[in-house]
Amino acid sequence: MRPPFPLITPRQSFGFGALVLCAGFTAQAQAGGFFEDTTAKIESRTVYFNRDFRDGHTSSDQGASKREESAQGFILNLQSGYTEGTVGFGIDALGMAGFQLDSSPDRSNSGLLPSSGDNPRGSKGQYAKMGLTAKVKVSDTVLKYGALLPDLPLLKYNDGRLLPTMFNGAMLTSKEVKDLTFMAARLDKYTARDSTDSQDIRVHCKNKRYACNTTADHFDMYGFDYKINDRLTAQYHYAELEDIYRQHFVGLLANQPLGDGVLKADLRLLKSADSGDAKAGSIDNRALSGMLSYGISGHTFSAGWQRMNGDNSMPYLDGSNPYLVNYVQVNDFAAAQERSWQLRYDYDFKAIGINGLSFLTRYVNGDHIKVPGSDQEGKEWERDSELKYVIQSGTFKDVSLRLRNATYRTNYEKFARDVDETRLIVSYNFSVL
């Protein structure tokens, strides 16, 4: 196997030029009084990704039996301040560039890089994308329009590969009332994590649950988060993907000191149904999930439970992560009528004097899956582990190294495949301004 992290070659200079252009913009911004509160950060991210589908062949009717690539990414996040006055104006910018380090046509399509479109089909050597966001602030209310990275219960942008998914539209966030956060948004486009093209917003089609490329004109959502006290927060959010699905979410976050540790609870209820013309077909799903955790002396012990009720799997947007406690490294355990449980253990080595080192392991088991066109009960399980270290001092201070491993197995091979997966991620964040 070739080394996962070879040097960047001169032919990659074009994509890197787009990033340099963004950095040049930040330097100009620093000189002007209008941008005196501007901040700009760049993340360097090197990713090695290996997914083995365990079918024992070089190819199958579902695609290649292995996906293995490595790539180098850079992400610039510039956030301006606001002009003075009752109404403040500002502008943000996202600049992203990715470069192929190692790939071949027979093991491409890892999600790190765009497809080249060539025959044999492989991955592009480099790509870049940029998004601008205009923003207006009045008191504690901010309206943004343009490129967005939403991190909300009904829309969490995907950042599981080299570069994150970007969404486009308008989003309003207001904190005018003490302890209450209100948000509302309308989004119409997204740029996938391994793409440079803006596409119509659409429903995710994992394991052929819904027809792929079922698009909508827009996606609307609004919600409230209310901090009842320091130990309890209540949430309600609503979203609708036009003519495809509508979704309600109710959540409760709680924490309570118990002995020498802290007990935490995270409860989530999502109810989904088809909307308007129902372009993806009938949708009927109620997803209930919860996680209970207890942390003490660097140890955290967690147990999760998740249940899908109704005739269909839980719908969510393509390019996003479903807000479920059993959404883990490979799988979401959100198939129709699925029941799943999770056991998880985390340890922070700071408790024994090793700062920056942490570990987690978890096991998720799902059954009772309604398999389309079959009377067979679907079953699946996943085991994950992760070791992470952030260098604390010296030349490489704040460089993060993360090793992730996953094993996934299922008995309904027509819609899902067994997986052994390894990811190695090296990242470093530094400020430009």
Image (cartoon, rainbow, N blue to C red):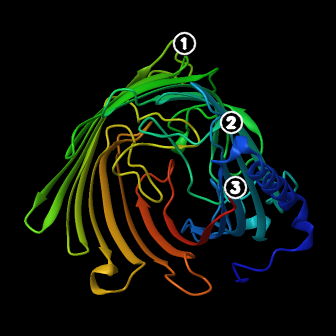
| Circle 2 residue | 133
| Circle 1 residue | 277
Q: Nearer the viewer, mark 3 or mark 1?
A: 3
**Residue 91 visible in the picture:** yes
Instruction: Rate crowding at label 3 as few (under 14), some (14 to 19) or many (20 or more) other CA atoms within 10 Å.
Output: many
Marks 3 and 1 sit apart, C-alpha to C-alpha, by: 40 Å
Taking the image as shown, residue 167 lies to the left or right of residue 104, namely left
Point out the image quarter for the N terminus: bottom right
Write down the quadrant of residue 183 in the picture. top left
Look at label 2 and name its amino acid: Thr
| Circle 3 residue | 76
Q: Nearer the viewer, mark 2 or mark 1?
A: 2
Residue drawn at (69%, 61%), measured in percent from left and top? 432
Marks 2 and 3 sit apart, C-alpha to C-alpha, by: 13 Å
How many numbered marks have been drawn onto this rendered protein structure?
Answer: 3
Instruction: Rate crowding at label 1 as few (under 14), some (14 to 19) or many (20 or more) other CA atoms within 10 Å.
Output: few
Residue 416 lies, with reference to residue 318, above or below; the image says: below
Write down the quadrant of residue 118 in the picture. bottom right
N-terminal-most mark, 3 or 1: 3
Marks 2 and 1 sit apart, C-alpha to C-alpha, by: 32 Å
Residue drawn at (74%, 36%), measured in percent from left and top? 198
Q: Position of residue 80 (x, y in %)?
A: 66, 44
N-terminal-most mark, 2 or 3: 3
